[in-house]
Image (cartoon, grey):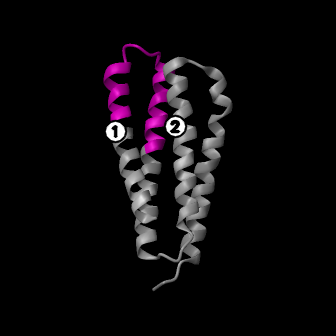
Amino acid sequence: MHRTFWTLGCAFAFLAVAAGAFGAHALRARMSAEMLAVWETAARYQMYHALALLAVAMAAARWPAGGWATAGWLFTAGIAVFCGTLYVLAFTGTRWLGAITPLGGLCFLAGWIALALAARGASAG
């Protein structure tokens, strides 16, 4: 399982850098300042949680008995829902997606709780 989360973390980090660069260079002249800020928020949170996936992968490799998968899948879902809806919102202006975005935020919050609980339950060996 740790290889899956390592691969996802690397892929999401790569895409976050690409999205940030795309926003800074290609979208700056095409998007309102408000929508560009939304795009940048998506890229920033994607990077934060890509790094969290790398932490999950390292912890799962070090302490296989922990319940790391829950945290990893919650971070993955959060990236897909929170960041994905913000990217689409910024690019298309489709405002109703803002109603779905908080579900991704809840996945992020639950992922951090799951990560803490997994660490607490992991054996010290």
Q: Residue 125 location, x and y as percent?
A: 45, 86
Q: Amino acid at mark 1?
A: Val
To which quarter of the image does residue 102 belong?
top right
* Residue 9 or residue 28, whichever sits in front: 9
Q: Is residue 86 left or right of residue 9?
A: right
Q: Which residue is mark 2?
A: 83
Instruction: Report x, y in % for residue 72.
Output: 52, 58
Residue visible at 63% across and 27% down in the picture? 97
Q: Magenta span covers which residues? A: 18-46
- Residue 14 belongs to the span the image colors magenta: no
Residue type for callout 2: Cys
Does residue 22 show up magenta in the picture? yes
| 102 left or right, relative to 65 | right
Q: Quadrant of residue 98?
A: top right
- The dot on residue 40 is none
Name the outermost residue toward the bottom: 125
Majority secondary structure of magenta residues: helix
Q: Are marks 2 and 1 in contact (CB under 8 Å)?
A: no
Within 10 Å of disc 1 (Cα), the crowding (few <14, some 14-19, many 20+) is some
- Per the model, the C-alpha gap separating discs 2 and 1 is 13 Å
- Within 10 angstroms of label 2, few (less than 14), some, or many (20 or more) residues? many
Name the residue at 54% across, 31% down.
86
The picture places residue 33, in percent across and down from the top left corner, at 46, 19
Name above or below for residue 36 compared with residue 115. Answer: above
- Residue at x 44%, y 58% (from the top left corner): 5
Number of numbered discs overlaid on the protein picture: 2
Between disc 2 and disc 1, whose residue precedes? 1
* Element under disc 2: helix
Question: What x and y, as percent, mark residue 110?
Answer: 63, 55
Above or below for 119 versus 45? below
What residue did someone put label 1 on? 17
> Would residue 7 appear left or right of 35 to someone viewing this image?
left
